[in-house]
Each structure stands twice: as structure tokens, then as C-alpha cells.
Amino acid sequence: MQLAVIILNWNAAADTIECVRRFSGWNQAQPVIWVVDNASGDSSAEAIARECPQVHLLRNSTNLGYAGGNNRAIVEALAAGDAPLLLLNNDAHIAETDVMTMLDTLAARPEVGIVGPLMFDGDRPDKLLAAGGQNIVWHLTSHLAGPPAGEPVYPVDYIPGTVMLVRAEVFRRVGLLDEAYFFTGETPDFCYRAKLQGYLSVVESRARASHTVSRSSKLRRTLYVYYIIRNRFLFLRKHYRRHFWLFGFWTLYCLALTVKLQFSGQSPTAKATWLGLADGWQGRFGGQNERVLAACSGQPPPVLQAGQSGQRP
């Protein structure tokens, strides 16, 4: 069975090369691998081209974020055929048997458009990170803490983009990931739009994957907080415009959180929260890496070849 695999890279060639090499022993699925380099400032692209000549390597001149980076490869993969698409972080791992289980679910259930596995911590294999996702404006914590009892395949509001398997026809009908999010929020948005077109998002609990979240820990107090806060307002603007009380709730929540963080000595995170709230209200979307990092550090904006949020948290 053919499978299009899409992997983003930003200055992490070693992770990406290791991720690609894990596919070498597969014999049931036939992965065609697309690697998108999100304008790395080092020699990542050259190293990947040298060590992984079998992949389709796409080089971006600027960091297009998670959404834009994936979109470039999605367009190429769709032009090549109708194989399901597996979006995969380069610091995530999933075995062939688990992918085959997810592919079997797609084949058996035509109403399902998007499938994800149970996600565990790569550093602590017994720690469940997510059992799917729930609506990001109805819940403070959007990752499900555990699978429900009963059926091994269950519907969710969205599949986290760390490991996400999608029918080709879903992208053709629903469209690509919304690049206004830049990073975080785009897969909840995509799954929401897919549901409006009649496609379910489900977790296949018999499939497991791991994600080494410690690799991106340094930016979780600033950039990740900023985009998570801001992009909730983008989601509200797109899908809940008439729910004024939801705008009010999230505004009050962010204000209270900003004050709490400031008084607890977490000034950079407080600034990131405030900026996310302000930009969400003002409609300032897309990539804001340099500006946010500068505001949170109190230093002039760094000169970056690419922002560091081109991958999933």
C-alpha cells in the first residue's frame, strides 16, 4: 500500500535523517517521503540531501511554519497520486505495524477522513501525552488525557499534527492547512472543516506513537504560549463569530493568566500571553517569531534565517 510521508525540518538534520532511516525496513507500506526544509540557517538541507537521496527534498527560502511547510509537500504529494498522507514530526516515531493499523481503519471506514494514534512521551514511554484532541475554544486543555472505554476507534474533535494520517480526497475537498495559524491550531481548524464536509477524525487506540517533547522545551514558555493563545482567537473568528461570550471568556482568562504569571516571576511567559491576546484581538496572524522572542527577552529582534516554530510542539 502506497503512503506519502511528509516531514518538516528546521536546523535539525540529525533528527530528520534518523526519522527517514526508520522507514528503510518497512515492507508492507510503500512510503514515498517528502522532506520540507523550512529555511534552515545551517547546512541541514545539504546533509539531508547527502544522507537521504531517496527522499523528495523541498527547500523553502523562508520559514512557512507548520501549516505552510506541510502545505508545500501536500500539494506535491497530491499531484503524484491518491496515496494517504502521513504528516510526521521529525522528533516523533511510529512503527510500520501501527501505521498499517491506521491505514486499515481508513480502508474499512469510508466516513473516516483523518486518523491518529495514541501519543506517548518519547522520554517516558509510559506517559500518555494525548489520546486525540477536543475543541480548542470549548476546553482549556485540548489534548484528551485518555481514551474512552469501549470501542478501540473513537471520534475526536481533532488529531494533533505530530502524527496525522489523512485521506488524499480530504485535502482535495476541504483544502490545505490554514497558513494564518503559522503553527498550532491549524489541525483543529482542518479537522473542523473536514467534519463540515462529512469526514470524521478518529483515534485508533491500537496504534501508538511517541514524541520527544524535550527537544522543543526551550521555546514552550514563549513562542508556544503565544501561538496557542493567539490562534484560539483566530479559530473563534473563523468558526464562532456569533459566540461573543466565548471571546469574552478567553479575553478574561488571558488577562488573569497574564497577571498570575507576572506576579509569579514568569515575566517572559506573561509577555507571550499578553502578546497572544493583543494580536488575537487585532487580527495579527501568520509568523511572528522574531517579534515575540524580542518582546519576551527585552532584546532587539534576532536575525533568524527561520523561526523556531516551524514544527509541532
Image: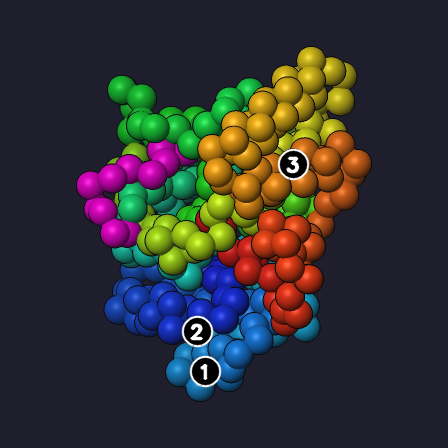
Residue at the spot x=25%, y=39% of the render?
Answer: 127
Distance of label 1 from label 2 (alpha carbons):
7 Å
Secondary element at tag 3:
helix
Q: Earlier in the sequence, mark 3 or mark 1?
A: 1
Q: Is residue 270 visible?
A: yes
Which residue is denoted by mark 1 in the rendering? 47
Residue at image x 64%, y 20%?
252
Residue under the point 52% across and 31% down: 263
Q: Which residue is mark 2?
A: 13
Say whether disc 2 or disc 3 marks the residue closer to the N-terminus: 2
In this rendered view, identify the residue nearer to me: 165 or 78: 165
Left/right placement of residue 248 relative to residue 33 reads right
Crowding around mark 3 (Cα neighbors within 10 Å: few <14, some 14 to 19, many 20+) is many
Q: Which residues are magenta?
A: 122-134
Query: Horizontal and vertical percent for residue 156?
Result: 45, 28
Query: Which residue carries the number 3 mark?
Result: 274
Q: Amino acid at mark 2?
A: Ala
Q: Residues under labels 3 and 1: Cα distance?
A: 39 Å
Residue 64, percent across and down?
A: 65, 60
Whole-number angstrom distance, CA of label 2 to CA of label 3: 34 Å
Whether residue 101 sits left or right of residue 166 in the image: it is left
Residue 48, image x and y in percent? Answer: 46, 79
Q: Residue at x 30, y 67 (%)?
A: 22
